[in-house]
Amino acid sequence: MFTYLNPTVRKRLADEHKLIRINTNGREMPISGSAIDGELSINILGPIPLPLQLGRDEITTQWYATVRSTELAKVEELARDLTKQNGQRFFSMLASSMAVNSVLVLGDLKKSENPLVRVHSSCLTGDVFGSQRCECGPQFVSALDRIDQDSDGGLVIYMSGHEGRGIGLWAKAATYLLQDAGENTYEANRSLGLPDDSRDFSDAAALLHYFVGKRPFRLLTNNPKKVEDLAKQGLTEVTPIKHIIGVNPWNRRYLAAKRDWGHEISEHDLARS
């Protein structure tokens, strides 16, 4: 693994326990060797001190970058070919082929008895551009603030491959055009022949097994399906905590569709501004 980086650096990081591999149950695996066919394993780099200036104040987090071994193996194969061909100018292709998820730890997680957790799906338009067509950006910033202020601390898992509930940014742009023509967010997906929600939370579950273990935790979410999906991965000691923020005239119809689909969103919540 990581053969497109200097092997000496890889070994040093592994020796310092800053590069590890875990299985679906969060147990550490040997760092060397290739992934076993059919077995999900995740590589984790970190912790990396990462101060954030978002929301209330500066927040100090510990950042971990994570990626599936199967995706990493594909990138390594490309890297070997590019190196042989002296094709360094194409190395940007490598980054685009990996969904690198992130874990942001706040507080002393080892001492936490009931950490506060947010599993946040990536949203370029909301998280980066500040779009008001969804509530994603405010949810992300508010989650960091709430966890930072919580006496038990916790973590945010940022799922980079979840854009548009798993359909990707290009398809998401198309659904926006369909929504502007009158369809709701789920109808637009169906018009494109796509699932209502195609997100896979197995990576998040594996990371929670590793970082939280068997402890109960509180999950900032309005989506019962997210709780159900994590329960299927063996995470049953989860208390959902409502996380309503960022309601505005641009996204009320979108949030109403999520409510009708099953999210814990009330009429009172939709009346917020």
Image (spheres, rainbow, N blue to C red):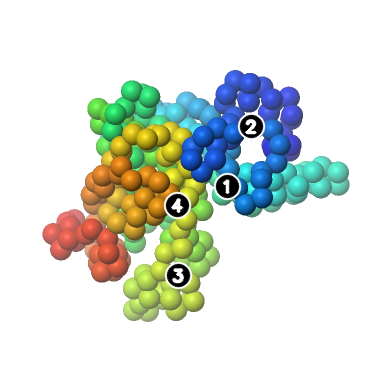
Given this view, does label 4 or label 3 mark the residue nearer the observer? Answer: 4
> Which mark is first along the chain, 3 or 4?
3
Given this view, does label 3 or label 1 mark the residue nearer the observer? Answer: 1
Q: Work out how far the residue at label 4 is from the one at label 3, CA to CA, in angstroms.
A: 15 Å
Amino acid on which the number 2 mark rests in the picture: Pro
Vertical arrangement, residue 249 with respect to residue 57, above or below: below
Q: Given the current orientation, which residue lies at the most extreme right position?
A: 85
Q: Work out how far the residue at label 3 is from the one at label 1, CA to CA, in angstroms.
A: 23 Å
Amino acid on which the number 1 mark rests in the picture: Leu
Amino acid on which the number 4 mark rests in the picture: Phe
> Which mark is first along the chain, 2 or 3?
2
The reply to whether callout 2 and callout 1 are in contact (CB within 8 Å) is no
Q: Identify the secondary structure beneath mark 4.
A: loop
Q: Is 229 in front, or is 180?
A: 229
Image x and y of residue 134, in percent: 34, 59
Image x and y of residue 157, in percent: 42, 42
Judge from the rendering whether residue 81 lies leftward or rightward of residue 8; answer left or right: right
- According to the picture, the residue beneath numbered tag 4 turns out to be 201
Q: Residues within 10 Å of mark 4 (few under 14, many from 20)?
A: some
- According to the picture, the residue beneath numbered tag 1 turns out to be 40
- According to the picture, the residue beneath numbered tag 2 turns out to be 30
> Which mark is first along the chain, 1 or 3?
1
Judge from the rendering whether residue 169 lies leftward or rightward of residue 241; answer left or right: right
Q: How many marks?
A: 4
Residue at position x 57%, y 24% in the image: 17
- According to the picture, the residue beneath numbered tag 3 turns out to be 195
Q: Work out how far the residue at label 3 is from the one at label 2, CA to CA, in angstroms.
A: 36 Å
Q: Identify the secondary structure beneath mark 2.
A: loop
Q: Is 35 in front, or is 142?
A: 35
Q: Work out how far the residue at label 2 is from the one at label 1, CA to CA, in angstroms.
A: 13 Å
Amino acid on which the number 3 mark rests in the picture: Pro
Residue at position x 60%, y 48% in the image: 39
